Image (cartoon, rainbow, N blue to C red):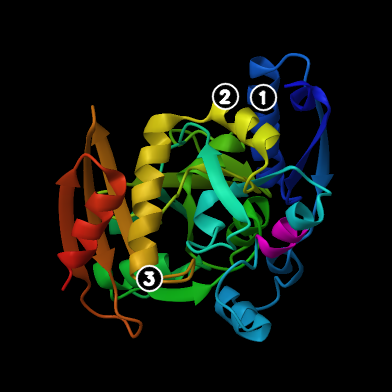
Amino acid sequence: MSELFSQTVIGTRGSDLALVQAAAVERALVLAFPDLRLSRNVIRTTGDRRTDVALADVAKAEGTDKGIFTKELEEALRAGTIDLAVHSLKDVPTVIDDVFEIAGVLQRAPVCDVLVTRAPGGLDSLPSGAVVGTSSVRRAHQLKWLRPDLKVVDLRGNVPTRLKKLAEGAADAILLAEAGLVRLGHRMSQPAVVSGVALHFDPLAEDRFFPAAGQGAIGLEIRKGDEAAAALVAAIRHEPTFIRVRAEREFLRLLEGGCSTPVGVFTSLDGDLLTMNARVFPDGGGEPRLSRAVGKEPLQVARQLFDSLA
């Protein structure tokens, strides 16, 4: 299959985290195919350009709640200017165009959300009325449910930008994904010094603060029917992670949920036994609906989880 070793173009966003993720994919591919010739195409997405307003408002302006971090990458895939798009999987809509497919994922990083603060002590030590910044409606709903005395504000930007905003006093705390922090070199057990300020990390256990579908996973999207790209992805695909995220994304699809839907999904895999727990919040806030399902086939377990909400 000589076309495997012709020039293969990886498409990625240009944030620090996106570039780290693209590099991880490139390393995995080169280990699997030492003769592979790779190049990288950095693409700016709608979500990258519009950092001045809330994600929900960006989506409304675009006429959709889906794909603001993926649309331009898919356009490049469709045009053939890239062969493989690298995504933070939690940013990928659960329903994508039929000409594309999520063909695989790398091994999952930690899936927890992390509360980052200027003072140590974590979530329980935040005083009543403390301001917490996040751009995620899922995080905002869960935080208000766990600590209704806190004030949640919208805070956009890539990871370094948000850490800098916290250090400069834009909020008392922020919520970020542990996966992104770890991939950028942060250690949860050690404070990070940003703009001369020590910032402290408090990972929130996933069974207490449910992550997003696909959180911590690097998704690999290709053109459906592209046999060369499919073979590349198959060689580096981490099957246990792929089983879990397929179930999570299917559950979100059944809910007709997009990336901005306030839904948390917590999965675990013990051998071939998959366990799923979900927390689904009403749009206006309040008590979530909870559900749990166990089984061996990911799409069936997702269906059971969905049906148990009724």
Q: Residue at x 52, y 39 (%)?
A: 104
Q: Position of residue 285 (x, y in %)?
A: 31, 81
Let me know if residue 25 is in the magenta part.
Answer: no
Disc 3: which residue: 262
Residue 127, visible in the rendered structure: no
Mark closest to the chain's N terminus, 1 or 3:
1
Q: Residue at x 59, y 74 (%)?
A: 55
Dot 2 crowding, Cα within 10 Å, few <14, some 14–19, many 20+: some
Q: Which residues are magenta?
A: 70-75
Dot 3 crowding, Cα within 10 Å, few <14, some 14–19, many 20+: many
**In-front residue for pair 169/139:** 139
**Label 2 sits on what residue type?**
Ala
Asked if 275 appears above or below 62 in the picture, the reply is above
Asked if 255 appears above or below 14 in the picture, the reply is below
Let me know if residue 71 is in the magenta part.
Answer: yes
Disc 2: which residue: 235
Q: CA distance from mark 1 to mark 3?
A: 35 Å
Disc 1: which residue: 29
Mark closest to the chain's N terminus, 1 or 2:
1
Dot 1 crowding, Cα within 10 Å, few <14, some 14–19, many 20+: some
Asked if 107 appears above or below 214 in the picture, the reply is above
Per the picture, the main secondary structure of the magenta-coloured stretch is helix
Mark 3: secondary structure: loop
State left or right for residue 14 relative to residue 88.
right
Mark nearer the viewer, 2 or 3 = 2
Mark nearer the viewer, 1 or 2 = 2
**Label 3 sits on what residue type?**
Pro
Residue 202, visible in the rendered structure: yes
